[in-house]
Image (tube, rainbow, N blue to C red):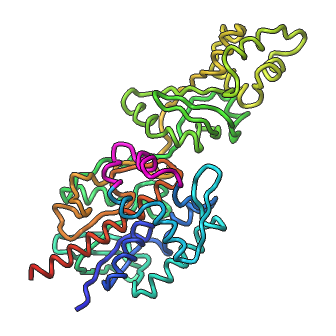
Amino acid sequence: MKKSVAIIGSGPAGLMAAEVLGQRGVQVEVYDAMPSLGRKFLMAGKSGLNLTHSEPFEQFVSRYGNRKDEVKKWLTDFTPDDLRAWVRGLGVETFVGTSGRVFPVGMKASPLLRAWINRLTASGATFYLRHKLSGLHADGSIHFVTPDGDATVKADAVILALGGGSWRRLGSSGEWVEWLSQAGVKVEALKPSNCGFDVAWSEVFKEKFDGHPIKSVVLSFGEFRQQGEFIVTKEGVEGSLIYAASALLRDAIAKDGKAVMRLDLAPDKTEAQLAERLSKPRGSRTMANHLEKAAGMKGVKAGLLREFVPKDEFADMERLAFYVKRLPVPLVAPRPLDEAISSAGGVMFESLDENLMLKNIPGVFCAGEMLDWEAPTGGYLITACMASGRWAGNGAMEWINQSDSRL
């Protein structure tokens, strides 16, 4: 009799697990609570699907922080180059952007997802939509709530690829945390990753600069230092440069109750150059015009200086040059989890064996963002999700084979 595996979740991790198992002759059944497949994957590609990154492998692996050793195992089995070859196998070419990020030609996620689902269907995979997981029992039975009533499914192995806790409306609700914890699985609390932060702007600044981009600045925090850009919002700050430092900033706020990032608003000028230019007589020019002409500070950058430079130091040109290069911006709190691009926390590796199977629920595997790891944007999230799905799929196959040998 043909063996079956139930995969719960149709994101990159779940679909990759389905592909691995389908290729090995297993009956694959994929369940998702949403009315369509891969919703978060499609959202990730809305402004250009960043699949992976072209940097050297060891540098790529280092992006996974204190979980790099665990993630490296998956990535060694399915490297960024393997991912590009896999995409090509679906009839979609990729290219490397100027920042080293890798995108599909055409940039969109939908053609890739469509080709992927067609291939999975041709291999025999079956998809069940609007099936919300409501229970998982030790005997391997799975319970769903569906539009047609409750349903119970029994499979030879189960792979949970339920996502983290961000973008709830796309299916990543994080509801699984409670019932896995009740089942004795160690779960690190979910928290926002690649997220924005609240800043206590003045009403004047908030009204004037909400939505304004801040370009070509260097953000420093501890040992972190990176050049890029971000956006001012009425609540605070968000954007690629903020996301790159978000794990450090979030953890500092959790530990100390606050975090102060430093901004170099003029990376192309030294402090001495700025002090010299600012100290020149400004004549009849207003301070705003002088700042713009001498230091290139105008618009939102000048607004930031007004916001955070003490009034009694604003007239001291040497001190003003200091602040242009090291402006302190206090962050109050991370933005809510549901707004984050991804989440940190999840099923702890101590609760999993080397094949990503739950130690206290044999035959049940976990993959993707519901595991306790995080990564910055730049293709690292999708790559590791796919690699973990492949790893869990192979683990489920090994479990099934061992189960047969035990009979």
- Expressed as whole percent of the image width and height from the top left, the position of residue 231 reads 64, 40
Relative to 66, 335 lies left or right = right
Q: Is residue 64 magenta?
A: yes
Point out the image quarter for the N terminus: bottom left
Relative to 169, 13 lies left or right = left
Residue 287 visible to the viewer: yes
Q: Is residue 199 above or below residue 341?
A: above
Q: Residue 272's quadrant in the figure?
A: top right
Residue 233 visible to the viewer: no
The total number of labels drawn is: 0
Which residue is pictured at 53% across the width and 73% down the height? 113
Q: Is residue 154 above or below residue 262?
A: below
| Residue range highlighted in magenta | 54-72
Q: Is residue 45 above or below residue 227?
A: below
Please, what is the dominant secondary structure of the magenta stretch?
helix
Q: Is residue 87 above or below residue 156?
A: above
Relative to 9, 217 lies left or right = right
Point out the image quarter for the C terminus: bottom left
Q: Residue 235's quadrant in the figure?
A: top right
Relative to 115, 367 lies left or right = left
- Expressed as whole percent of the image width and height from the top left, the position of residue 396 reads 26, 72
- Expressed as whole percent of the image width and height from the top left, the position of residue 214 reads 68, 36
User: Which residue occupies the foreground of this view, 372 or 286?
Assistant: 372
In this view, which residue lies farthest toward the bottom?
Answer: 1
- Expressed as whole percent of the image width and height from the top left, the position of residue 30 reads 38, 77
In this view, which residue lies farthest toward the right?
Answer: 284
Which residue is pictured at 60% across the width and 36% down the height? 227
Which residue is pictured at 88% across the width and 15% down the height? 285
Q: Is residue 75 magenta?
A: no
